[in-house]
Image: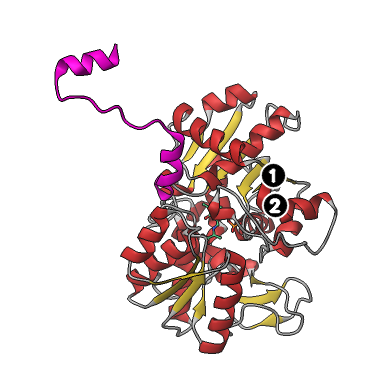
Amino acid sequence: MFRLVCVHCGAEYSQDEIIYRCKKCDHLLTVKYDLDSIGIDKKEMDKRPLRLWKYKELLPVTREPISLQEGGTPLYHLKALGEELGLKHLYAKHEGMNPSGSFKDRGMTVGVSMALQLGKRTVACASTGNTSASLSVYAAKAGIPAVVLLPAGKVALGKVAQALMHGARVIAIRGNFDKALEMVHELCVTDGIYLLNSVNPYRLEGQKTIGYEAVDQLGCVPDRFVLPVGNAGNISAVYKGLLEFKELGWTDSMPKMTAVQAEGAAPVVSAIKNNLDVLVPELNPETVATAIRIGAPVNAEKALTAIRKTNGHALSVTDDEILAMQRDLARKEGIGVEPASAASVAGIRKMAEQGLLDADEKIVCVVTGHLLKDPETVIKQCAPPTEIDATIDALRAVLR
Ligand code: F0G
């Protein structure tokens, strides 16, 4: 049993209403369950394998889900980087290990299943890349058409390749992500297409399972949860999920929710710093981490609550800091992530250097997408392969 509730005025809507914002005050909606009657205890749940659908009683889907076995991603102990930074319990949850290579698959297995549950037969999104790749994959699995809007020339190659290969209608607009989102939202409302950006509260339900899994993998609630922030849906989702675990009595604390943005696209960081309730959009967001090149995060309201209520942090990192951490994760930990994903760990490096962290803190950084998503940014940072004649002497000479 669940309903949709406005996070601002508390207005309630039934679960079959197709609605993305409160009709009374235009604020965001969230999914509220009757947690007293979910009908399973944690011990029973823990007998199931670790993956997203382990938590099905805390998800809104009642039909057979459209699934490609998402979730159950590795939680790596970052030993080398932790030692360097003086942190004993530094972890990375590698969301790049999901079916399409990013955490968006958690949102889309739930979101596309909900589209079908609600009788919708066409889905759409705007995207900096990963959302479009994931939606294309799940629409293909469901056998329904998908329309995706991208900011022209600003999406990493691997992501465009995925959207095209999985058969979505891919449209590149001459404008940025924020404009694309505004356009697709209007299209969906007027043309009856189902909108699967993170303004859709059901999509965030899938993404909250990152928090559930991390708690189950660690065996406790971490002291701090660190996420790269673009549209601010993921940090809001993880916070919501962990509050539910606490309300159920399955945990007894909350992590400090920590948002890391790229310096050229950091409106959430400014809002926290200046103590604002309504964020001032960044009109020309720019960063090498194109996944989080967003100036007007649609979920800001939820994210600000998550950060403030948990005594968390919001900080920005430069493109150079992001890329340096992308290389460090790759070379010191064997973890390949795209630039936006490295932002979370780059933020932790910055906080550690500023003396803001305790050596014993248990810290989970979400690394959100796979290295192969953005091969061009990788190639630009690395020396090209050394080409030689095909002889053993030439090989020995070059290795000497
Ligand atoms: N990391 C990656 C790799 C992303 O693709 C995104 C968002 C984020 C972090 C930020 O998450 O928006 O919930 O704060 N990508 C979206 C997209 C916007 O269209 O793929 P957020």
Ligand 1 lies in quarter: bottom right
* Horizontal side, residue 56 vs residue 313: left or right: left
The residue identified by callout 2 is 266
The image quarter containing residue 291 is bottom right
- Residue 299: % across, % down: 67, 64
Type of amino acid at the residue the image marks with label 1: Ser
- Residue 9: % across, % down: 79, 76
Q: Secondary structure at mark 1?
A: strand
The residue under the point 14% across, 20% down is 391
Instruction: Please indicate, yes or no, whether residue 282 appears anywhere in the rendered image.
Output: yes
Whether ligand 1 has any atom under 8 Å from the Cβ at mark 2 is answered as no
Marks 2/1: CA distance?
A: 6 Å
Indicate whether 345 appears above or below 25: above
Q: Residues within 10 Å of mark 2 (few under 14, many from 20)?
A: many
The residue identified by callout 1 is 316
- Residue 268: % across, % down: 73, 55
The image quarter containing residue 32 is bottom right
Asked whether residue 394 is drawn in magenta, I would say: yes
Asked whether residue 38 is drawn in magenta, I would say: no
Instruction: Work out which quarter of the rendered image holds the C terminus and state it.
Output: top left
| Of 255 and 163, the residue lying toward us | 163
Instruction: Please indicate, yes or no, whether residue 200 appears anywhere in the rendered image.
Output: no
| Of 116 and 34, the residue lying toward us | 116
Type of amino acid at the residue the image marks with label 2: Ala
Indicate whether 95 appears above or below 396: below
The residue under the point 55% across, 47% down is 288
Q: Earlier in the sequence, mark 2 or mark 1?
A: 2
The residue under the point 77% across, 72% down is 8
| Of 393 and 143, the residue lying toward us | 393
- Determine contact: label 2, label 1, CB under 8 Å: yes
Segment tinted magenta in the rendering: 372-400
